[in-house]
Image (tube, helix red, strand yellow):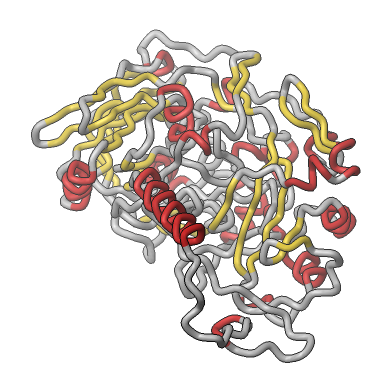
Amino acid sequence: MAQTGAVEEGNLAEVIATKENKASETGGKRKHEGDEPERSGRAKKKRGGGGKKLRPGERYVPPPQKRNPGVSFNKEHFDETSYYFEGGLRKVRPYFFDFKGYCKGRWIGKTLLEVFKSEFRAESIDYYQSAVKEGRIRLNEAPVEDLTSVTLRNNDLMRNTVHRHEPPVVGTPIEVLVDDGEVLVVDKPASIPVHPCGRFRHNTVIFILGKERGISGLHTIHRLDRLTSGVLLFARTLEMSKKLDQLVRDRKLEKEYVCRVDGEFPEGELVCEEPILVVSFKVGLCRVDPKGKECRTVFQRLSYNGSTSVVRCLPLTGRTHQIRVHLQYLGFPILNDPIYRSSAWGPHRGKGGLVGKSDEEVLKALVEEHRSKESLHLLDIPEDGLCGASKKSNAQGQQDIKFGSSNSLLNEVSQDTSSTEIDPTANLNSGLPTESQCVVPTELHQNQKGATKSQHTSQGTRDHLCSECKLVRPDPTEKELVMYLHALRYKGPDFEYSTRLPDWAKEDWSEVE
């Protein structure tokens, strides 16, 4: 279901870089010209943070860095790694990646060992101790020598370098439908997220457009779920972004979807107005609930082939998974929906809101079902997803993180209908650290151990500490990566963008076993 997005990019990188270069040049010039004696014979004493004298044994913590939300993803980010295509899939070569995050309030006074033990369980303590020896864990940019030797303080900046593996997506090219300098409209293939989130960074629409077409500085107007295909709008300018965003807020942007559902959908127009509640931020799991937000979706059957129906969907509101949840409630879930057609909802599969289980029981059953099928990737959660920390917010409204986990949770929940800026140092609705940068630390090349154990291959780097490098995962099938839900048309007062009808939505289509 398309969600009014919480993402947008500015393009101030060049301006900032120019200012920094000028400042650097000016500073250098003064240094060489400066032959005059100092006006004051007194040299300022170096003190700790905030001008305070450090007590004996006290550790200096630098002030937090100012974030610049206007800097967009650029070529430096796009060049972090590369793609290759295999078996109809787009694959990202594994790469080293730096996760950065500031010390959380609940970590203050604890050692790194205590924090890793309690919150970062994606890897073992042995792994983190080995990472320390390799120089991959840093505190305030200094290598950590021992996990037990440092007690965390407020504003401590933690950096963890990991070997990152991204899941494959379909190899279908992203087709540009319109690019007129103000609006960019694409036909998004299923399985590709709109922007970096969770385990995805380079296998996203934003990065693919940047890497393959040199396009950056896009303003995202709405979102599509990762498994959903179809019309996706971006604004090229801030002015157009504000204009389109206002249309979304005023509900003047008409959206039309098509889907294929189980069974014989009723003829005629069918309206569902059941409120929808988000019950799990880890999976983006939702259900009909009186405490939920008001919703309205209009459905109309287009065809029926004897076992499944193609249905036209007009969501008049923009809630998370709105079309999928309403179809489940009506008893006609999308044919290959990995969440809302699951048997985890009980014998009625959630029809009429009949579940008979608590939200926690549904979530657990859903995870167990996909774990047994080795298809947890369809839920976008890692193997240890249920034991990780739940989504919370700190004072700055940023999400708590699984610091440095290569299996960070993907949260496809968007609760904001406004269009805001994409921050390349922040990962929206994803559980990733608030600041991240792709860096291969110097130690990995200069340190004797790192230099001998980090290998470069035709399919990317291999890392002796990386658990993913030791696994051989079967590739997902195209059937698993394509959900039968497609954004067919978006229409405003003076524009209309549409795509071709997917093959699975055609009247003569039949499912291949």
- Residue visible at 77% across and 23% down in the picture: 457
Where on the picture, by quarter, is residue 440? Answer: top right
Q: Is residue 387 left or right of residue 218?
A: right
- Percent coordinates x, y for residue 414 in the rendering: 41, 52
- Percent coordinates x, y for residue 133 in the rendering: 87, 55
Quarter of the figure that contains the C terminus: top right
Query: In the rendered image of this protein, does residue 336 appear above or below residue 154?
Result: above
Query: In the rendered image of this protein, does residue 225 appear above or below residue 346?
Result: above
- Residue visible at 34% across and 57% down in the picture: 416
- Residue visible at 84% across and 51% down in the picture: 134
Which residue is more in the foreground, 197 or 56?
56
User: What is the number of callouts on the image?
Assistant: 0
Which residue is more in the foreground, 248 or 241?
241
- Percent coordinates x, y for residue 199 in the rendering: 61, 42
Does residue 283 show up? yes
Quarter of the figure that contains the N terminus: top left
- Residue visible at 28% across and 29% down in the picture: 184
Q: Is residue 371 left or right of residue 477?
A: right
- Percent coordinates x, y for residue 218 in the rendering: 33, 38
Which residue is more in the foreground, 32 or 462?
32
Residue lying at the far left in this picture: please name it: 494
Q: Is residue 235 left or right of residue 12?
A: left
Does residue 346 show up? no
Query: In the rendered image of this protein, does residue 462 appear above or below residue 112?
Result: above
